Amino acid sequence: MIDRHLTFCVLLTARESQADIEEPETAEVKNDKERISESINFSDSDLFEEIPDDDEIGDATWSEVCRACCVHEPQEWLKIFAGVCLLIFFLYFFLLGLELLGTSAKIIGGCTTGSLLGDDTNPVAGLMIGILATVLLQSSSTTTSIVVSLVGGGLDVKAAIYMVMGANIGTSVTNTIVAMGHMGDGDELERAFAGATVHDMFNFLTVAIFFPLEIVTGYLFYLTKAMLPDEVVSDQEQWEGPIKKIVSPLGHKIIIANENVIQDIATGETESCDEYYPTECDGAVNAANCKVGLIGCDKKTGDCPAFFQDGADQHDDEVAGGVCLFLSLVLLISCLIGIVTLLQKMLLGTSTRIIYKATNINGYLAMVIGMGITIVIQSSSITTSTLTPLVGMGVLQLEQMYPLTLGANIGTTFTAILAAMVSDSVNSFQVALSHLFFNLSGIVVWYPFPPLRNVPLNMARKLGKATRIWRGFPLVYIAVMFFLVPILLLGLSELFGQKTVGFTVLGVFLTIAIFLGFGLSMFWWRFRGGKESTVLKLARRQKKNATIQTLPEDMDYLKSEVLSLKSEVLSLKERIVLSDEELANGKKLDDTDEESEDTEQTA
């Protein structure tokens, strides 16, 4: 009897809980299915689980966009003003973090990058050097400017073109790193990583077409050579973008990279970084009195940054660069969280139709906007890294991020063109134009035609979905695509470049082994259940990690439920005991009545 009463109690409690959830007065509206009008809002919890077609949600008008943007109460305008001020604050320090990240990378990898860029290379080695140099410097603008300067000093134009192709690939690592700031939210990470890697996919696909084409035909070399006169002479100074002018003063108070070290080692004017050390100052610590190493001083103000150390050696400067790199990552992630949280609150309740209408502009116009922004701020990394969080939040769709990225690719060539105009060499200008026409050629192939346009978009979406299976995938992706593969191919090309029988045979053996290993891995992945088993294991691992993370909350919930059930069971037992006693007393009374009736009948 107790078990039956307990079951009834549990069912009653569950039904009461369900009734509480279904009450419209107390239930919180979290998605369009619970909303009476069934309209879709930016704050919906299931916003991106299944995005409806335009025909289903309807296309917003520009009047609706204007009302949502400009029609507010005075208190709302005050909140918007405060939100914009906070957004500018976070955005400034986000840009400062990117500035410090690039500066720290130049200090840590400056000597290595200079020696890489200074080597005579074959096409494969040139491509890999361009990738590694840009990843280490965190700036394709810096890499291409150095390459253009090296061409003015005698570097072969064809080798420089391959390096510029590699720089195009390496520049996309920065916004991929920024995308990892969304690891705390699976939905945002998927969208942000897809938005970041669409840049990678375009660059990889473009190189896959035009790198072998350039080796076979010299397409970019002869095209740009035909466009140039015999001499190009210019005395223009290198232009610094306004964003750098805003961010650099504070950045220069913290740390400054001495880019002369990279260029001197690359051109052969200096054999190694040892010639710059130890640093020493003759009197006051300023730019005029100090011999600097990888960390320099501000030539305009004469001040030396906080991380500059009198008497430092190369190891001291590299350690300082590592510390600053760590601080820049902390600053980036903190500001990224602040920007995302603030934008979410500012867009809370805004209809998705209005957001899509406001951001849905013509793709070619988006390219022009991306190009203009990049020309102004002189960095494609800053452009794409600033847009990546917007894709993660869903404010920008992947289809809108793609043309903005292509425009940024064109805009970043402006830096190399300016660097070439400073040089007196026609070859320098030829390399800068090669960078421009390489990106334009890629856009002509991969954007105007929808079937080809969808290739990089679908590849990026698949990479984004991979983060659902395992959130550590972005780290592996960066390590493999931007470090392991370039280093491996660079090593193989160097073996063949030695032009000796022993190294050539070793290179052939290693190449065959790598291709066989890759082929067997692909066969296992596609035809032996490798994909299914790997996905299943990673999904289990991800589920296990998610379960472990939520275990304390689940345990607390279960404890509260057990205590609640325990109290209900105790009260139920008391009621059952009382009912049993009442039944027993009633039975005794009935027996007494029957006995009395029997006695009366007998009498």
Image (spheres, grey):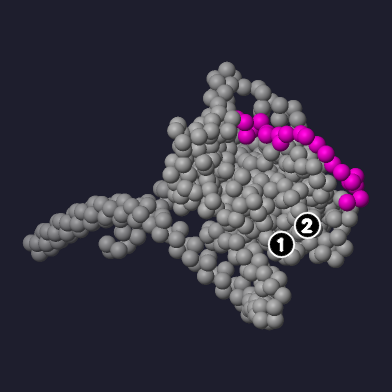
| Residue matched to label 1 | 120
Which quarter shows the C terminus? bottom left
- The Cα–Cα distance between marks 2 and 1, rounded to whole angstroms, is 8 Å
Write down the region rendered in magenta: 225-247
| Tag 2 and tag 1, C-beta contact below 8 Å | yes
Q: How many marks?
A: 2
Camera-nearest residue between 379 and 183? 379
Q: Magenta stretch mostly in which secondary structure?
A: loop
Camera-nearest residue between 168 and 428? 428
Instruction: Please indicate whether residue 293 sits to the left or right of residue 432 in the image.
Output: left
Q: Residue 372 location in percent, x, y?
A: 75, 36
Q: Residue 35 location in percent, x, y?
A: 59, 39
The amino acid beneath tag 2 is: Asp
Q: Which circle's residue, 2 or 1, is located before the other in the chain? A: 1
Checking the image for residue 156, the label placed there is 2
Which residue is at a point 75% across and 30% down the rendered structure image? 62
Which quarter shows the N terminus? bottom left
Q: Is residue 203 visible?
A: no
Q: Residue 592 location in percent, x, y?
A: 12, 59
Residue 209 falls in which quadrant of the image?
A: bottom right
Instruction: Please indicate whether residue 75 sits to the left or right of residue 150 in the image.
Output: left
Crowding around mark 2 (Cα neighbors within 10 Å: few <14, some 14 to 19, many 20+) is some
Which residue is at a point 65% across and 36% down the rendered structure image? 351
Residue 235 falls in which quadrant of the image?
A: top right
Q: Which residue occupies the extreme left position in the image?
A: 603
Camera-nearest residue between 112 and 580? 112
Instruction: Please indicate whether residue 306 sits to the left or right of residue 507 in the image.
Output: left
The amino acid beneath tag 1 is: Asp
| Secondary structure of residue under mark 1 | loop
Residue 113 part of the magenta segment? no
Crowding around mark 1 (Cα neighbors within 10 Å: few <14, some 14 to 19, many 20+) is few
